Image (cartoon, helix red, strand yellow):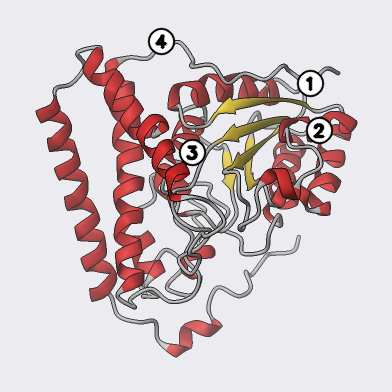
């Protein structure tokens, strides 16, 4: 086994106009949705923890483009973008944030615990790293059932230090499970830089002792993400076992809405926004290739803002769940043969 050399250069664009516009819409929806969620949090309409995905949109958008029906997704608590990328109803996502009955978990899960069996989205998990062994279990289920589906298990650079992650790596490698581990390395975990919290800062190498292939990807470039994702998903789907993708990305906001992010300089954030923003980067390509005009892109933004406004309005109009909902969706009746 040889871990792949790092790959951070821009992927050549072999993408159609329709695909590029689709990715632009998807990333813009996540960005505008998260901006609105931040506003609602500031107004006191969203309670508890709330972790925004602003800046990291290219990762889930590019990876989602590599999947087929039946493939599963699981992530941690910075999960709103993943839900939207899975085509979950923005109204249901926002209503879950505000704790209303119209939410995708009937207002009982909140920001960190939403699920959709129909979309093969398995959460949304509040315990750091807990989704990784569960995602590995999804891969085991795929192999046990004889399907060719692949599970994506997303986690961050902070979670990459959790012991259960390596137990999962060992099992996945032993049994050649179809799992792609996507490390969203936004550089600061919960507030500590990778250089200070990780003895091995090239996180894609964390699978070496388990003979798991891995590589580093420019997570601010949706085309580079898709290119690397297609290779990793094909590898796992073909029965060769798990694969690790370390996405070098960046979050513009604090770890959560309560984090002032004083551990980094404003100039650093501004530099990333100005030179590496995933949405602006794709916008530039669309304009350069003549796939869209400034006016057309403005109209897309206007349409997206309308969708987000509708979701926000719905999230405030939907009633709070009845106390009796505490006793629903706890256990599932299963027929025993």
Q: Is residue 144 above or below residue 325?
A: above
The residue tagged 4 is 14
Q: Residue at x 32, y 55 (%)?
A: 35
SS of the residue at dot 1?
A: loop
Q: Earlier in the sequence, mark 1 or mark 2?
A: 1
User: Is any atom of residue 102 visible in this view?
Assistant: no
Q: Quadrant of the C terminus?
A: bottom right
Return the x and y of residue 68 as percentages of the image width and height: 51, 30
SS of the residue at dot 3?
A: helix
Q: Earlier in the sequence, mark 2 or mark 4?
A: 4
- Whether the residues at callouts 3 and 2 have beta carbons within 8 Å, the answer is no
User: Toward the viewer: 158 or 234?
Assistant: 158
Q: Earlier in the sequence, mark 3 or mark 4?
A: 4
- State the CA–CA distance, disc 3 to disc 1: 23 Å
- State the CA–CA distance, disc 3 to disc 2: 21 Å
Q: Is residue 130 above or below residue 324?
A: above
- Whether the residues at callouts 2 and 4 have beta carbons within 8 Å, the answer is no
Q: Earlier in the sequence, mark 3 or mark 2?
A: 3
The residue tagged 2 is 207
**Where, by quadrant of the figure, is residue 107 drawn?**
bottom left
Q: Residues within 10 Å of mark 1 (few under 14, many from 20)?
A: some
């Amino acid at each position: 086994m040889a871990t792949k050399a790092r790959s951070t250069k821009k992927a050549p664009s072999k993408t159609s106009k329709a695909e590029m516009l689709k990715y632009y819409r998807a990333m813009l929806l996540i960005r505008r949705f998260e901006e609105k969620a931040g506003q609602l949090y500031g107004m006191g309409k969203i309670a508890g923890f709330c972790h925004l995905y602003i800046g990291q949109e290219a990762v889930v958008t590019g990876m989602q483009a590599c999947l087929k029906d039946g493939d599963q997704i699981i992530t941690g608590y910075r999960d709103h973008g993943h839900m939207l990328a899975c085509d979950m109803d923005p109204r249901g996502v926002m209503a879950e944030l505000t704790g209303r009955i119209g939410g995708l978990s009937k207002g009982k899960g909140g920001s960190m615990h939403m699920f959709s069996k129909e979309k093969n989205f398995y959460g949304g998990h509040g315990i750091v790293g807990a989704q990784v062994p569960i995602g590995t279990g999804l891969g085991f289920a795929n192999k046990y059932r004889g399907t060719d589906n692949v599970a994506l298990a997303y986690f961050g650079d902070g979670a990459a230090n959790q012991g259960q992650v390596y137990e999962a790596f060992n099992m996945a490698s032993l049994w050649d499970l179809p799992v792609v581990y996507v490390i969203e390395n936004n550089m600061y975990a919960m507030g500590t830089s990778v250089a200070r919290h990780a003895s091995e800062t090239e996180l894609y190498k964390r699978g070496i002792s388990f003979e798991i292939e891995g590589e580093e990807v420019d997570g601010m470039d949706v085309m580079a993400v898709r290119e690397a994702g297609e290779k990793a998903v094909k590898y796992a789907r073909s029965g060769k076992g798990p694969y690790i993708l370390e996405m070098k990305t960046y979050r513009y906001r604090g770890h959560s809405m309560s984090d002032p992010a004083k551990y980094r300089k404003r100039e650093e954030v501004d530099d990333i926004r100005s030179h590496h923003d995933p949405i602006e980067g794709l916008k530039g390509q669309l304009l350069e290739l003549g796939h869209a005009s400034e006016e057309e892109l403005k109209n897309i933004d206007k349409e997206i803002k309308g969708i987000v406004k509708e979701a926000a309005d719905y999230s405030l109009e939907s009633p709070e769940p009845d106390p009796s909902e505490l006793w629903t969706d706890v256990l599932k009746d299963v027929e025993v043969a």
